[in-house]
Image: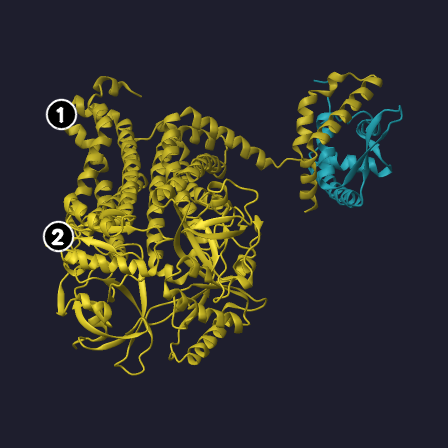
Amino acid sequence: MGQREQLELLPGTLDLLILRALVRGKMHGYGIAHMLKVTSADVLDVGESSLYPALQRLLLNGWVTAEWGASENNRRARYYTLTAAGRKQLSAERADFERMVAAIQRVLETA
Amino acid sequence: MAKLLRRFRYWLHRGKMDAELAEEMEFHRAMLADHGGSPAVMGNTTLSREDARAVWIWPWLESLCQDALYAFRTMRQEPAFTATALLALGSAIGLNTSLFTIFNAVALRPWPVRDPSRVVLVNRFVREGGGDFGIAEYRYLAQFSRSFSGLLAIHNGERVKMQDHPQQLTYVSGNYFRVLGVQMERGRGFLDQEDVAGAPEAVAVISYELWQNRLGADPQIVGRNIRLDDTPFTVVGVTPADFTGTNPLRNDIWTPLPARKLLRPNDPSVQSWLTSPKFCCTPMAGRLAPGVTRSQAEAELAILIDQFRTDNQMGVQRPQIIATGTSWIEGPRKKRQVVPMILTLFFAVTLVLLLACANIGNLLLARAAARRREIAVRLSLGGSRLRIIRQLLVESMLLAVAAAGLGMAMAMVVPAAVFRRLAEEQAFHVAPDLNVLTYTIVVATLSCLAFGLAPALHGTRGGISAALKAGSESEGAQRARLPLRSLLLAVQVAISVTLLANAGLLVRGMQRAQALDPGFDVRNSTVLSIDLPASQYTGPRTMELTRDLLAQLDHSPDQPACGLALNPPLSNTNYITSFQLTDQPGSPMLHIYSNEISSGYVAAMGMRLLAGRNFVPEDTARDVVVINEAAAKRWWPGQNPLGRTVLANEKMRQIVGVISDVYTNDLSSIEAVIYFPIIGRWGAPSIVVHDRGAASLDRVAAIVKRIEPQAQIRAEPLTANFSRKLRPSIYGSELAGLLGLLALAIASVGMYGVFAYVVGQRTREIGVRMALGAQPRQIVRLVLGSSARALVCGLACGIGGAVALSTLLSHALPGIDPLDPVAYSSVVLLLSAAVVLASAAPARRATRVDPVRALRWE
């Protein structure tokens, strides 16, 4: 149990966020988690229990590839790169997500 | 598709992938620690890793493994059920697999040669009988045929002595090993110049087995001499271990065709056999030339045979030529005789398998009933019905797989043992191969579905609430729903009755065959065979011996009736001669069974002279013959054959007598036979003595010894030949009996299971009845009555099935009466005994139910 209340991610959105994070270039797992945390102003704290299965899922689907490299503090780290299929998936999922959010928003506002 | 490939790649490198994942997560933790986070936030690392890894594995595969594990645990918890089911199914699958193993080894494998699909056996069918080819004819065909890259002549079935042991020898054409593509273990095959009729060469190829077992695997064997019937032959080659020859009998030695002259130096017929166009009976095979089809080759051979017969003034024959593959099942001649037998056998073992399936189906049904509550709970907790059916099917599959393992184990042992018992000289590799494995898997899968599906569907249907409420089955509702159980019981009874009844009919048929009158006096006759040292005994001397025997045996008044014959009755050899009706113009050259006999033979055998006269001693110098009744009826129906002349064995001969028919070759049919007066040209005769007493046999033996001191004499009662011929039907009825008893045993276990189940389910009702004063007898009747309908239905269907099956069988095996009352009543008795046995323990338990406890129950 964390000390702070964590927001639960909507199912499926973690994959989308990881893909989005990789648009700028290759990153390792910790980097992705760190970036999500920073850019969401500490709201999204993704633990390895959900991050690594998600990364494996993306590898399986061929949306990212992985290679080993040296990290900024000179340790061996696995870097993930977005593939062309991953880019396509990102834009499709993003469109879906935006439609979904807009729809939810509309429902909430009328209620 | 790409996804599947990635999964597969992951699976291949799963060890490395796992290590990488672990390292990656380790890095993550380290980074987190560096940046002031606490590892505790990370949660359970192992679990996370498991989750990440699970992405790659099919979820259903994983749950299938769980199902299997669960099934395994369930099976271990119920050892009695598991053992019963495994034993029944294992033996049933084992039977099927064993039969298929034998069938596969005997019937499905082609000759062990290079590219066997292009090698064909050339079969010739002639309306008048007499098949295969003369060697002169073969040479003509081999010379002119363009359809074959090589034609072979293969003359089987000669026995020669080597180091005092009989060995099987085959005469082959010079191109035999070359055309078949046999890679010699040592030395070479034959050369064409070793296969020239005028210049026989004493060369031999020996089998790997003979080389290993009799010749000490001598590495210098090629070029060495071996003695075959005391004639020296040079070994030129040794066949590889996997070449077992081209006939069903194991073959030890091959020589070129003309070498027969060396082995039978004084037999003038060998020269004719090698060169006369009128000889027959050498099988021919060939390797088709590239691109030539079987029918093209058949057509070409038919034309060439016509030309050959025209060239040799032999008249038109119009034989039917059929080229077939070399596996046994493809031979058209054998097919007609044996295929119904094989089908019946497969049908019988399939019935046993079905029986086992019905049995296990019933056991599973009883178990599903016991697990109703568990299943109901799972259904109510949201388990899908499909998922539970799958679970139950996985349990069945596990059973089937284990049983298939048992079956394969049986297939490794049983067929070899059967072969050792039936025929030690067969050349078949009976070890199970890929075909057998495939067959076993198919059989196991089908049987798993057969016994598993119905109980699984049956067990998962019906309302959840009812099952949960009642706890166990409510008796009234369940009795109405029982037909599946009764049906399965009836099936078991029906199948075991069918098999048992047929076994009974076969045994009765065999008894009848043993009592069959073969046309001669089996019980009181003895055959003396004379063995002579082959090297010293050549044509003229066997003729002298025969003449002396004729003179001395016929002129001793204190002798029992005795006679000489070239071929004693029911031996394994047949003599066939050419035959033509000269008084009917244009009649073709035929082939007919022949024998040579002395005048005393008819009396010694207990045969009768029907017309004309018996042979007299002077007939050895005359061209006269005697025929049997079958021959007279066939060619001179309603006429008198006496005094007519026929062309037999290349000479004009007059018919002087007709004698009664006997079963000379086998016990299934009477053939037309022509008898020549015995001269002894073909070898030493056998003596048939109408007596079994040692004293008179010794007297006859003493006469032979006086004439030829070196002779070795073997006495064998005719009953020995007779029972040798009966052996197939004896084995057949033994096998049927075994199947029937196995079926009855499995069905008894099934009946026991049902009775025990009924008692278990109706304990309360029985308790109430006992409390109300029911007698034990009435309780027993209650238990038995619960299944009476199924038993009676099964019995009726079984008898119906038995009548149908045995009617089919009686076409293949004469002597079977499909309505034999003795067989059927003994089956009913056996079944009743089985019912009593199977119900004894459950009935006892029922009569001991304590009313008080039974009522307090639940």
Q: Position of residue B197 (x, y in %)?
A: 47, 66
Please rate how many residues cluster around mark 2, counting C-alpha atoms within 10 Å: few if below 14, some from 14 to 19, many from 20.
Answer: some
Earlier sequence position, callout 1 versus callout 2: 2
Residue wearing tag 1: B775
Q: Position of residue B550 (x, y in %)?
A: 20, 59
Residue B486 vs B517, above or below: the answer is above
The subunit carrying tag 1 is: B
Pick whichever, B810 or B539, lies toward us. B539
Q: Is residue B627 left or right of residue B683?
A: left
Identify the mark at residue B151; answer none if there is no mark.
none
Q: Position of residue B598 (x, y in %)?
A: 20, 62
Rounded to the nearest angstrom, the CA distance separating label 1 from label 2 is: 77 Å
Q: Is residue B563 left or right of residue B418?
A: left
Please rate how many residues cluster around mark 1, counting C-alpha atoms within 10 Å: few if below 14, some from 14 to 19, many from 20.
Answer: few
Q: Is residue B26 left or right of residue B768?
A: right
Q: Under tag 2, what secondary structure?
A: loop
Q: How is the image coloured?
A: by chain
Residue beneath the point at 37% across and 66% down: B269
At label 1, which amino acid type do we have? Answer: Gln
Residue beneath the point at 20% across and 73% down: B655
Residue B25 vs B553, above or below: the answer is above
Work out which quarter of the rendered image holds the C terminus of chain B and state it.
top left
Residue B544 vs B466, above or below: the answer is below
- Spot the cyan chain and give its letter: A
Residue beneath the point at 39% across and 26% down: B79
Residues marked 1 and 2 touching at CB (< 8 Å):
no
Residue B287 vs B484, above or below: the answer is below
At label 2, which amino acid type do we have? Answer: Gln
Pick whichever, B148 or B545, lies toward us. B545
- Spot the yellow chain and give its letter: B
Residue wearing tag 2: B559
Q: Nearer the viewer, mark 1 or mark 2?
A: 2
